[in-house]
Image (spheres, rainbow, N blue to C red):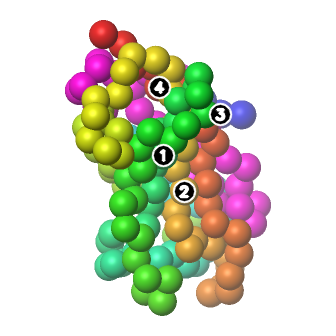
């Protein structure tokens, strides 16, 4: 398992043996201040891969970063509030060694707008309707291995 310098990234096993999704972020955030998440789709393989995904435009994929309470297992926040209609699909080719970087900002509030209390939270990310293949065929969606975010006073 690989871990980023900040100790938070844990990439998934490569989909189709070469493409993986990672999420990185600071180890901690202050109550009510939120934080930034960086999600990377990485082609670690030896050949180009076509990434099929849904989204309202080619540059705004249906990327969902989810924050879950470690103590209650309750989801407190989703970045993807209203996913695109599944019929809106796009394709992007990732050449070997290349990645696609997506940034998501969390404001420190839950899905109902209340400030999230201090605690330990799991962060996951998934690219909705995604598939990484050597051609434009369907495959399993890409999901990042959960990381840990501590929210403190």
Furthest toward the top, the residue is 153
Percent of width and height locating residue 58: 36, 78
Q: In the image, 97: left or right of 140? A: left
- Crowd around label 1: few <14 · some 14–19 · many ≥20 (10 Å): some
Percent of width and height locating residue 124: 54, 44
Provide the secondary structure element on which disc 1 rests: strand
* Viewer-closest of 148 and 41: 148
Mark 3 in CB contact with mark 1 (< 8 angstroms): no
Query: Quick one: quadrant of the C terminus?
Result: top left
- Residue at x 41%, y 44% (from the top left corner): 77
- Residue at x 29%, y 18% (from the top left corner): 30
Mark 2 in CB contact with mark 1 (< 8 angstroms): yes
Cα gap from disc 1 to disc 4, whole angstroms: 11 Å
What main secondary structure does the magenta stretch of the protein show? loop
- Residue at x 52%, y 62% (from the top left corner): 127
Q: Is residue 136 above or below residue 92?
A: below
Which segment is the magenta one?
A: 7-35
Q: In the image, 70: left or right of 87? A: right
Q: Which mark is residue 66?
A: 1
| Residue named by callout 2 | 126
Residue 4 showing in the rendered view: no
């Amino acid at each position: 398992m690989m871990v980023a310098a900040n100790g938070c990234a844990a990439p998934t096993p490569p989909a189709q043996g070469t493409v993986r999704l990672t999420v990185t972020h600071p180890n901690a955030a202050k109550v009510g201040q939120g934080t930034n998440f960086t999600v990377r789709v990485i082609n670690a393989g030896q050949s180009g891969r076509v990434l099929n995904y849904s989204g309202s435009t080619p540059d705004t994929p249906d990327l969902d970063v989810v924050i879950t309470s470690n103590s209650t297992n309750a989801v407190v926040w989703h970045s993807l509030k209203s996913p695109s209609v599944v019929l809106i699909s796009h394709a992007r080719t990732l050449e070997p060694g290349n990645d696609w970087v997506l940034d998501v900002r969390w404001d420190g509030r839950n899905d109902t707008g209340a400030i999230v209390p201090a605690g330990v939270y799991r962060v996951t990310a998934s690219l909705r309707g995604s598939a990484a293949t050597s051609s434009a065929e369907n495959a399993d969606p890409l999901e990042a291995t959960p990381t840990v975010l501590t929210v403190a006073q």
